[in-house]
Image: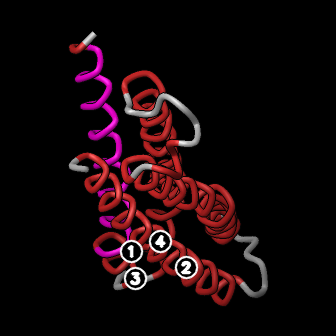
Amino acid sequence: MEHAKGLVLFAHMMAGILWVGGLVYVRFVLLPGLGRQQPAVRGPIVADVGPRTVSYLLRMGEITMALGIVNVFIFGRITQMEQFVTTTWGLTITLGFAFSLAIYLIGQMVTRPATAKIAATVGAVAAGTPPPDAPALLAALAARQGKALLVQSALGVLAVLTMATARFS
C-alpha cells in the first residue's frame, strides 16, 4: 500500500509541475516571444500550437486534480468530512483544490474558447475570407488570453504554496 501511495503522490506532483509550469512558460516565455513575431508568422503557429497546448494543460489539470482527490480520500489524513475545515492540513488542501479548480475553470471558460476563436480567425485569414475586424479581434483575444494566463499562473503559485504547506503541516 505504501508503494501505491508513493506512486500516486509522485504522479500527482509531476502532473501539477507540468500543469503550473506549463502555464507559467506559456504566459511568460511563449506569448511574449510570439508577440514579437510578424502576424504572418505568429498566426499559423498560434493556430497550430495553441489548441494542442490548451488541451495538454487542461489534461494535466484533470490528472493533477484527480490524483489529488485519490491522495486525500484514499491515502490522506481526512477520516471525516469536517476535517476539511477543522484541521490545518484539511484547510490547506481545500484551499489548494479551490485554486486548482479556479485555474481549470478559467482554462475551460476563457482560454479554450479564445484559442479556438483565434485558430478559426487565422484559418479564415489564410483562406482569404478574413472577418472585417480580424486584426482587432485577434489583438483583443490575445490580450484576454494573456490576462487569463496571468491569473492562472498566480493561482498556480498559490496552489503550489498551499499544497507544500499541507505536505509539511
Circles 4 and 1, Cβ within 8 Å, touching? The answer is yes
Q: Which residue is the site of mark 3?
A: 35
Q: Which residue is the site of mark 1?
A: 31
Q: Say whether residue 91 is left or right of residue 32.
A: right
Circles 2 and 1, Cβ within 8 Å, touching? The answer is yes
Q: Amino acid at mark 4?
A: Leu
Residue 160 on image: x %, y %:
32, 57
Q: Amino acid at mark 2?
A: Ala
Mark 4 or mark 3: name the one nearer the start of the chain.
Answer: 3
Main SS of residues in magenta: helix
Q: Which residue is the site of mark 2?
A: 142
Mark 2 or mark 4: name the one nearer the start of the chain.
Answer: 2
111 part of magenta stretch: no
State the mark number for residue 149. 4
Circles 1 and 3, Cβ within 8 Å, touching? The answer is yes
Mark 4 or mark 1: name the one nearer the start of the chain.
Answer: 1
Q: Say whether residue 96 is left or right of residue 116.
A: left
